[in-house]
Amino acid sequence: MMLMDVFRLLRAPLALLLFSLNLSLWGIIVTVCGLLKLLLPVPALQRQVSRLAHWAYRHWSLHNRQLINLFNPVEWQLSGLTELKQDSWYLLISNHKSWLDIPVLSQFALERIPEPKFFLKEELKWVPFIGSASWALDMPFMKRYNQAQIQKNPALKGKDIETTKKSCEKFRHTPTTIINFVEGTRFTRAKHKHKNSPFRHLLPAKAGGIAFTLASMGSQFDAVLDVTLIYPDNPNHVLIDMLLGKLKRVVIQVEVLPVDDSIIGDYFNDEAFRQRFQQWLNQRWVHKDQQISHYLGTAPVTLTELDCSSV
């Protein structure tokens, strides 16, 4: 009994240590690969180094999954995976509940789809190992500007979209999964209230980033993967609960959507397309909110309750 008490006491710091070591080990390898890519101007050698970096990325994801399972009696519930391929191009959109979403989606991608490329906040560039490894894997860092900043400096308008365009150019020659948390930030009750979200379990989705990604690479994407993440037993601090051994269920629901002319167009200059795209994304978010509500047994939001122009 005393040993079990000691284990419970040490579980969180031990879990944090092992996850940190896993990140550090594979992060160093990926960072070294990034430096080699800079020093070796030969494309063939750069491709070999890139393969090594992605091998390390896959092992980081694999060991994360093993550590999550080691410290938690977790049940993984996955649905909608029958059509996925590793040699395809995907745009994956997802709700964003926790920092744990990134390792969860990375391990979900293992042996199913190409290694995911996340759109990351600019601030993460300076986080040890996370920033350097993400840079080496060509993951785009997005610096978002609020309306006040743009009004003060109009030259900032469209800067984040230009970053998206440059990043997408790097993904044209290798099967890739581009992941975008279209809410723009992690869900919290405080943010939900502050943004006056019309959804029960989601923040309003931002359409511009994925619309531009589709315009840049739409013809190359084989599908849009609409992923819904649910942690039904951990409504508040999912990552902390995981470190404490309290993560019980991870639900990943995937819908494979076609990429066609209805979602590819000039979002910023074609007002009719802009409205259609917002309506499409709004309907996806209503459906996602209903999925979460159905799973949790809460009252779902309906489309008639929403202002479609709010997306």
Image (cartoon, rainbow, N blue to C red):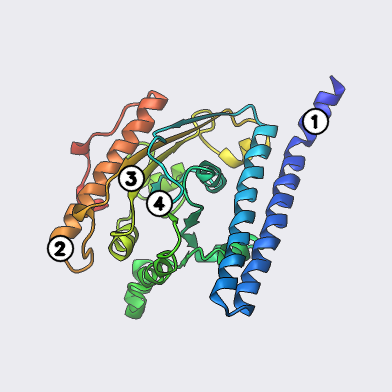
- N-term mark: 1 or 2: 1
The x and y percentages for residue 125 are 57, 66
Spatial separation of the CA atoms under disc 3 and disc 2: 24 Å
Disc assigned to residue 271? 2
Spatial separation of the CA atoms under disc 3 and disc 1: 41 Å
Give the quadrant of residue 180: bottom left
- N-term mark: 4 or 3: 4
Spatial separation of the CA atoms under disc 1 and disc 2: 59 Å
Extreme-front residue of the structure: 44
Spatial separation of the CA atoms under disc 4 and disc 3: 34 Å
Residue shown at 60% from the left, 29% from the top: 74
What secondary structure is found at the residue carrying circle 1?
Answer: helix
Tags 4 and 2 in contact by the CB under 8 Å rule?
A: no
Mark 4 = which residue?
A: 88
What secondary structure is found at the residue carrying circle 4?
Answer: loop
Disc assigned to residue 7? 1
Dot 2, how many residues are within 10 Å of its Cα: few (below 14), some (14-19), or many (20+)? few
Spatial separation of the CA atoms under disc 4 and disc 2: 31 Å
- N-term mark: 3 or 2: 3
What secondary structure is found at the residue carrying circle 3?
Answer: loop
- N-term mark: 4 or 2: 4
Q: Label 4 amino acid? A: Ser
Q: Label 1 amino acid? A: Phe
Residue 31 placement, left or right of 185: right
The x and y percentages for residue 185 are 45, 53
Up/down of 143 relative to 89, above or below: below
Along the viewing direction, whichever of 53 and 27 lies nearer the viewer: 53
Q: Label 3 amino acid? A: Ser
Q: Nearer the viewer, mark 3 or mark 2?
A: 2
